[in-house]
Amino acid sequence: MGTHVIKMPDIGEGIAEVELSVWHVKVGDLVVEDQVLADVMTDKAMVDIPSPVHGKVISLGGEPGEVMAVGSILISIEVEGAGNAKDVPAVAAPAKAAPAPAPIAQAKAAPAPSKPAPVVAAQAPVAREADERPLASPAVRKHALDAGIQLRLVQGSGPAGRILHEDLEAFLLQSPAQTKTAANPYAERNDEEQIPVIGMRRKIAQRMQDATRRAAHFSYVEEIDVTALDELRVHLNEKHGAARGKLTLLPFIVRAMVVALRDFPQINARYDDENQVITRLGAVHVGVATQSDVGLMVPVVRHAEARSLWGNAEEIARLATAARSGKASRDELSGSTITLTSLGALGGIVSTPVLNLPEVAIVGVNRIVERPMVIKGQIVIRKMMNLSSSFDHRVVDGMDAAQFIQAIRGLLEQPASLFLE
Amino acid sequence: MPQTLHTTLLIIGGGPGGYVAAIRAGQLGIPTLLVEGQALGGTCLNIGCIPSKALIHVAEQFQQTVHHSQGSQLGIEVDVPTLDIRKSVEWKDGIVDRLTTGVAALLKKHKVQVIHGWAKVVDGKTIDVGDQRIQCEHLLLATGSKSVNLPMLPIGGPIISSTEALAPTRVPKRLVVVGGGYIGLELGIAYRKLGAEVSVVEAQEHILPAYDAELTLPVAESLKQLGIKLYLKHSVTGFENDRLQVRDPNGDTVSLDTDQVLVAVGRKPNTQGWNLEALNLDMNGAAIKIDSHCQTSMRNVWAIGDLSGEPMLAHRAMAQGEMVAELISGKSREFNPAAIPAVCFTDPELVVVGKTPDEAKAAGLDCIVSSFPFAANGRAMTLESKTGFVRVVARRDNHLIVGWQAVGVGVSELSTAFGLSLEMGSRLEDVAGTIHAHPTLGEAVQEAALRALGHALHL
């Protein structure tokens, strides 16, 4: 038997620290090659760490949320043969002291139908007195500390209530959600839940805080008649949807931004406020704000100016899927020059988007509603949509911002002009 | 001024706490630097545990031989032996040398940098050794303890501390030991066996005041048999012209003629003389206050061992040192042992692990207390030992063992079984159901458990 040590890999260019997001294995687990051991995160990219070996997990190098140095020990796995860590025999020692829990549980459960198996499915947490010492061997106590479990809460199935390795395993498996019961819906509640701000949430919090602290936000809202645009969209979908894929409104707006930005280079820019430099970019890399299970992500449609309508549509859909499944790469999540944010049907009538620094503009899409509008003295029903956009007033003047949005409005209200060169 | 050294972990003190922390830190890849002013191994290896055990062994061997020369029941006939105490001390020094050299080699193997010199604290991340400045992320204080001195008995000349007592150039004709705790008794008994007339002065009502009377009775009987005079409830008032003045329980002054006086009235945390005050740490009496992670009141400043107070035992310091290294490496750890064994190498030896009957009662536990005498143990008889017993304390409701005590020849080694039993959460049935090898002293352990269950076999 040897120990295979996996170190925190270098995932991004020049990044010295990586945040450990979640473990998919725990100490004692048997893992097979290519099984995902953990997710780690840099900036906004989540990366899987697969196992290169078969073996048993003997120690974890950190807690979820911990920021670990690249090259530090992420996980140690006991493997057949020599392993890659002859120089760290100390790590292997506790594994021998702690017998593999799974085989024991099976062995006990099989021949004794009269006796309940030690792995009880729904184990109620036990409340011991605060000063009452939970009875457990040193190996079990160490395991509990490693797993971040308060032994006080674990039911012991051993003699005199001794907590066994199996009890700990059972406790670890048990989901806290199961312990909640549906009771009187009008019962007074005094429960609290503390959620550590780690991983994605921490990154989002930091970036939002940073953006609102540094940039001088101002928002500008304009109403756009998208009747013609939506007719075009529906028409194109009917005609080409099957072959080229469905179009949403977003690729049209991206197109409008690309065209309008030709006349407003100051808006497709990054403002480096530390060095007091504004970089205007020719390329239009549109960040598309996307909600994923773990939080807000902004995958980037690169070179939107060089893509066709369907090209942008396809890229937006692909990135959204990647971001939602947490598989977007670091490159796909960085480098935008301007951001587009839309909550679709939930878009509301107005919003005040937060800038994605160091960009200087973000375009927000509100929902489309049919409204009675007065056109040439007649009341007509039109499809109306608001654009709520924010700009960094430090470097974008109100006049420029207004003209930029008016240009977009013009393009969207006369959709043919989107494609005139 | 040399360039400032930088390290992750800086340890002040190379005793059992400090050097174990350093080794473990080395294993975990933490850059570690250890500062030691005197000798690696600290009090334990140089002037404590190890040399005292060596001297006790010499004394025991010598006394046995004397015993044989006076007509032994074993049929061994020898002439009256003589003792070359210089050679004995040389032998003891050889052991100490081997062990301290071993510690140095272990530290080197684990890439721990050792700096010899006296550390002075500058702040929580900086210390000076001479003109060498060292900066660290974590500072581990492990400076141990010092013998407590009595103002009326300043060490020097005929008044000695345990340090001098462990390196005698000759055996005094008469020795008075001030202090009837384990250090005083271990050394007093050894000196008695080496040929000195020994008296022990103790202010409390009985010897080994930390333990109950039942447990210490066999030791008291042994002292009587050895001819050691006990002055209980006597307190020292002064020393003049080879006479130690003590006040008896009635308040009258008694003079004890003696050649040497050994002051062994306990130890105190070594907090003076290295500018510890600069850190202004929270204290717990004379010791540094620590939590269950050995953290002091200052972030990333840790304290272990005797410096952090009672029980002042090397094995506690070692366990704390190991834990602190693991904590610094990012592991989740807590100092939460079921028991810390305490052993007195008196004759007979005495072991206490976990709760005594009195402590169990004070903790509100309803307990079964049961003991098994060595008089009924075959192996003890073959060792010419009849005194002593093994005692177990277990909860009445679930038979969980909460404490073990033993007194008798060679019982120090039983501490291993006692400690394991408590840490594993054994019940009486577990120990009673374990086959203990025959013939061994350990059978008394099993029999004590059996007796607690009401069915001892050999009683």
Image (spheres, coloured by chain):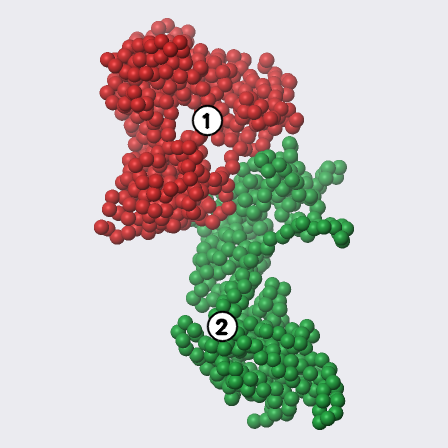
Residue at x 49% of width, y 26% of height: B415
Q: Amino acid at mark 2?
A: Ala
Neighbourhood count class around disc 1 (C-alpha, 10 Å): few under 14, some 14–19, many 20 upward: some
Residue beneath disc 1: B342
**Colour chain B appears in:** red
Number of callouts: 2
| Whether residue A124 can be seen here | yes
The residue that disc 2 covers is A215
Residue at 58% across / 50% down in the picture?
A26
Circle 2 or circle 1, nearest the eye: 2
Please give the label number shown on residue B113: none
Amino acid found under the numbered disc labelled 1: Ala
The quadrant holding residue A89 is top left
Q: Position of residue B212 (x, y in %)?
A: 50, 18
Q: Residue at x 45, y 48 (%)?
A: B329
Chain containing the residue with disc 1: B
Residue nearest the viewer, comparing A392 with B209: A392
